[in-house]
Image: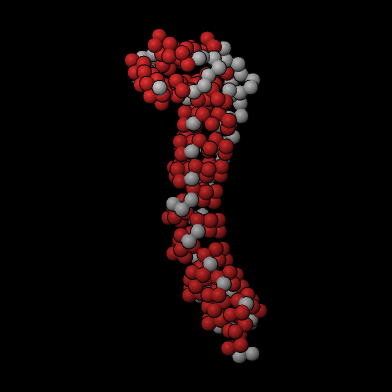
């Protein structure tokens, strides 16, 4: 069969290159230019064939035994998940992948804490691919998005507190909460009272004690005071809330309370 017929066959089905004995460079090039994955059927491909294959289909990098760094980088730049096909990637390759997606951390063996931090700062849910993330990595993931708690077995307590302070919804992602912990959560975010666990009972005097501690602070968070005044509470009526601030609140808490009451009127 002449070359023209072989080329026509390859154009129709590039994988036919596997069945051609001693294919020419032209045939090899056409095969990978049509479908880069045909590279797997070309033993000892030339540099030109390698480059054409990666240009067509970056994940064809998996079929090269000792690819040049430039080809590796090209493959990763075109898709962070191509890092999966690279053994012992260089720092440049790792960075090229992580700059695209934090999920690339799953293809890095024994990543340093710095790389783990970079990953979760890029994509908070990349923490699910990190075995035993350090407290610092957990906190970074949670700071990016409280939903990171979903992917952390036995999360660090400080990370949990950061999540709760960010949003009261984070309480629902904590498997086990003690009464003492929940009282602490109330100090961080009054709105967690919307999600009191069924097995936890908080007496009114204990709740008032916690609120006094927060509202008496000179630097009490403005949002906390406004949320306290506005959120529905079974234990305290709207009037009791105002009286509590008047009796125990700092000057800042009292000022915010007056402003909030005037605003809602």
| Total marks placed | 0
Locate residue 155, reporting x and y percent: 55, 32
From where the camera sits, is residue 260 visible? no
With 247 as the anchor, is 79 left or right in this view? right
The one of 15 and 170 positioned closer to us in this rendering = 170
Locate residue 96, reporting x and y percent: 44, 55
In the rendered view, would you say 241 is above or below 43? above
Residue extending furthest right? 19
With 258 as the anchor, is 117 left or right in this view? right
The one of 204 and 1 positioned closer to us in this rendering = 204
**Residue at 59% in and 20% down:** 178
The quadrant holding residue 70 is bottom left
Residue extending furthest bottom? 2
The quadrant holding residue 243 is top left
From where the camera sits, is residue 172 visible? yes
Q: Quadrant of the C terminus?
A: top left
Q: Quadrant of the N terminus?
A: bottom right
With 2 as the anchor, is 210 left or right in this view? left
In the rendered view, would you say 6 is above or below 129? below
The one of 7 and 254 positioned closer to us in this rendering = 254
**Residue at 54% in and 51% down:** 107
Locate residue 219, reporting x and y percent: 35, 20
Locate residue 234, reporting x and y percent: 55, 17
The one of 124 and 39 positioned closer to us in this rendering = 124
């Amino acid at each position: 069969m002449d070359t023209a017929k072989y080329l026509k066959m390859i154009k129709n089905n590039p994988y036919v290159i596997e069945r051609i004995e001693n294919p020419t460079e032209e045939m090899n090039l056409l095969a990978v230019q049509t479908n880069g994955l045909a590279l797997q059927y070309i033993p000892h491909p030339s540099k030109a064939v390698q480059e054409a294959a990666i240009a067509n289909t970056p994940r064809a990098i998996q079929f090269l035994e000792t690819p040049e760094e430039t080809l590796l980088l090209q493959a990763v730049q075109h898709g962070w998940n191509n890092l999966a096909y690279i053994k012992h990637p260089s720092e440049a390759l790792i960075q090229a992948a992580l700059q695209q997606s934090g999920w690339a951390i799953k293809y890095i063996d024994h990543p340093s804490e710095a790389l783990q931090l970079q990953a979760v700062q890029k994509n908070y849910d990349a923490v699910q691919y990190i075995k035993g993330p350090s407290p610092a990595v957990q906190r970074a993931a949670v700071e990016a998005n409280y939903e990171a708690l979903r992917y952390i077995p036995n999360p660090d307590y400080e990370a949990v507190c950061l999540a709760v302070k960010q949003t009261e919804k984070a309480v629902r992602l904590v498997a086990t909460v003690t009464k003492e912990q929940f009282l602490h959560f109330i100090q961080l975010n009054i709105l967690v009272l919307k999600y009191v666990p069924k097995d936890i009972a908080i007496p009114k005097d204990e709740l008032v004690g916690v609120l006094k501690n927060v509202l008496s602070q000179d630097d009490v968070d403005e949002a906390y005071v406004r949320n306290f005044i506005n959120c529905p509470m079974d234990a305290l009526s709207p009037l009791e809330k105002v009286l509590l601030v008047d009796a125990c609140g700092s000057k800042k808490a009292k000022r915010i309370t007056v402003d909030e009451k005037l605003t809602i009127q």
